[in-house]
Amino acid sequence: MFAKTGERKRAKGEGKKRGHPGDDGQGERKKRGGEEGGQSQGDGSRKRLDALSVGYFRRVGERLGEGFDENEEREMFVANVLTEVKGKAVVVAMDPTGSITLQRLLPLCSPEQVAGVLAELGDQAGSELKAVSCDKCGGHVVESAVRQMSRWSESSQKESPGATGDEKDSCDALEAQVLSLSQVVRDNMAEFIKHVHGSHVVRTLLHVLAGCLGPPRIESRPGAKEHNLVPQLIDFEIPTSFWYGLKSLTEALMDNVNLSVVDSVASAAFQTMLTVCHRNRPKLCKQLLRRTTEYLTSRSAAPGVSPLLVFLKDPASSRLVETIIQLSGKSLLRHLYKNHLKGQMVDLALHSIANFPIQRLTAASAKHKMFLTLFDELIQGIESILAAGHMGVIVQLAESCAESGEKQTDLMQCLLRAFHCAEPGMRHVSCLPLFMSLLTYEVYYHSDTAEGDTPTEVPLSSICYHGSRLVQALAKFKERSLLLSSLRTLTPADLLTLASDPSGSHVLQALTITSSDKGRGKILKRLECTEVVAGAGLLAEDLAAAVAAHLPVPASIPIPVSTVRARYQPRQEALGPAG
């Protein structure tokens, strides 16, 4: 029996919050007191707001949540709060309550006011700004302030030929503060990118200097479920100085490229650098990809072994290699495969960590001729990969076959053999439930009989996520007759199970949409049973509406087409990437 999921095995202790310099709890806390709302707890220790100030900023946060009816009222409120912040911005930013309030206040501030807050957070030497940026509360404030630079173009467009110099100076002041922060980061790059909070400031700064922003960072709660979704980036105009600022920042990062392969926090900063440059500075990205790859492939390793193989199996550096593969062009991909990975694909696909970069390489090569060679190598170990539970590799292989239009028949035949339904031919009609459940013929039908015996009817069950993803990819093949024939053998009860299952419903939808007009009609006729339509609920409407968009719905279908079209909303959810 094949494993149903292929999850990345985490190293012992991974997933827990990393300790870092400047964390709360180092040393004993002293009693609060002193002037201006906070008192030092010793050299390098944390400052706190007094109870009165905490209450004030909590009330400010509550007022911000209520909103403002008039711009004048909002501007006056913001100015009053900033007056209270003045002189103790560092203490406010590093206090939990003050930090949250400042993060909500900064989007309402003018660029000049944001620049003023950033100026207060730093000093001439930059040590104060570094301390705030590497603080678990202060780092969020610095990020929020830097993100306001996205309003630069908006403010610039408002400047008319008759505008006052103060309006232009407002934008120039924020620009200068962002560049000042960039200088502080460059001077202390190694400390910033290794710091669990400081690295986020570096990543936000990279986004802003490149002229693109994603959603703001949200502090996750312990035990909260993580969703590895790619954030949507929005481009905005940037001043010319940011082009040179980004170049200087990337050079400082490349001077510390050695940290990208030994520290997972630093590795994330390098991944962000490559991603934002690929989006808005493609020529610079190409240079960075080449230099990073040269570093990774030039390290010492065992004789005859590429050093890249070591990095592919490391939790920190493997994610950087994934990003490099995703962003590389044809020539670099061919170089990586021909000189470092060829002959090692199956072994890497069986590795608990290295199989993820192999998935990215399989996806990236689909548009190039090298995919044919890569496929021939991976297909030799497909049963071993299935047994290891690394279904992400198999699903991506199927998706790349669908995208390239190559090797589709070879993969289908190999899967039939792997699931023991290739011979005798009568077993072909059992392929759909086997693929969806990731179980071999003997295990699914509890069969020890000789080949050719008719299997006992088994209700459809055990539909799993990766099985669903596999069939959805196979449904895009040019030849889908085996899947459709298998679908037609399902009983009404099995169709109800398939339509009602969170993963199975996507399979039914994929097979319906990719079928011919005649095939869609046959599928709908199987669904005309009232029990199936009633049990499947909205899914039946989804299917009917999808079919209605391609051909007339037979009159025998007990779903009014006009009602379906009126009520039908395209399904927004989609099963995420395998792995």
Image (spheres, rainbow, N blue to C red):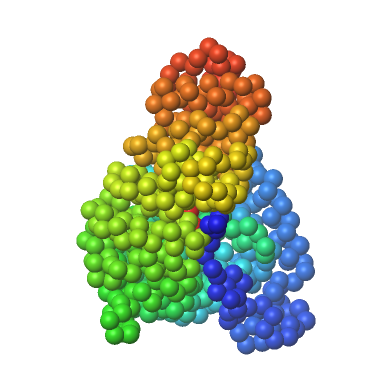
Q: Residue at x 61, y 55 (%)?
A: 104
Position of residue 267 measured from the top left corner of the image (x, y, whole percent): 44, 71
Choose top left, top right, bottom left or bottom right for residue 568: top right
Look at the image and tell me whether residue 185 can be seen.
no
Using the image as rendered, state which of residue 170 and residue 276 is in the foreground: 276
Using the image as rendered, state which of residue 308 and residue 25 is in the foreground: 308
Left/right placement of residue 307 relative to residue 113 reads: left
Left/right placement of residue 347 relative to residue 201 reads: left
Q: Residue furthest top?
A: 555
Say above or below: 162 vs 219.
above
Look at the image and tell me whether residue 264 can be seen.
yes
Q: Residue furthest front?
A: 450
Using the image as rendered, state which of residue 209 and residue 394 is in the foreground: 394
Position of residue 264 measured from the top left corner of the image (x, y, whole percent): 48, 73
Q: Residue at x 35, y 54 (%)?
A: 363
Q: Residue at x 48, y 23 (%)?
A: 522
Using the image as rendered, state which of residue 52 and residue 420 is in the foreground: 420
Number of labels in the image equals: 0
Q: Residue at x 65, y 21 (%)?
A: 530
Say above or below: 573 vs 229.
above
Choose top left, top right, bottom left or bottom right for residue 281: bottom left
Left/right placement of residue 64 relative to residue 543 reads: right
Position of residue 280 measured from the top left corner of the image (x, y, whole percent): 32, 55
Position of residue 334 measured from the top left corner of the image (x, y, whole percent): 24, 62
Q: Quarter of the image for the N terminus: give it.
A: bottom right
Say above or below: 325 vs 411.
below
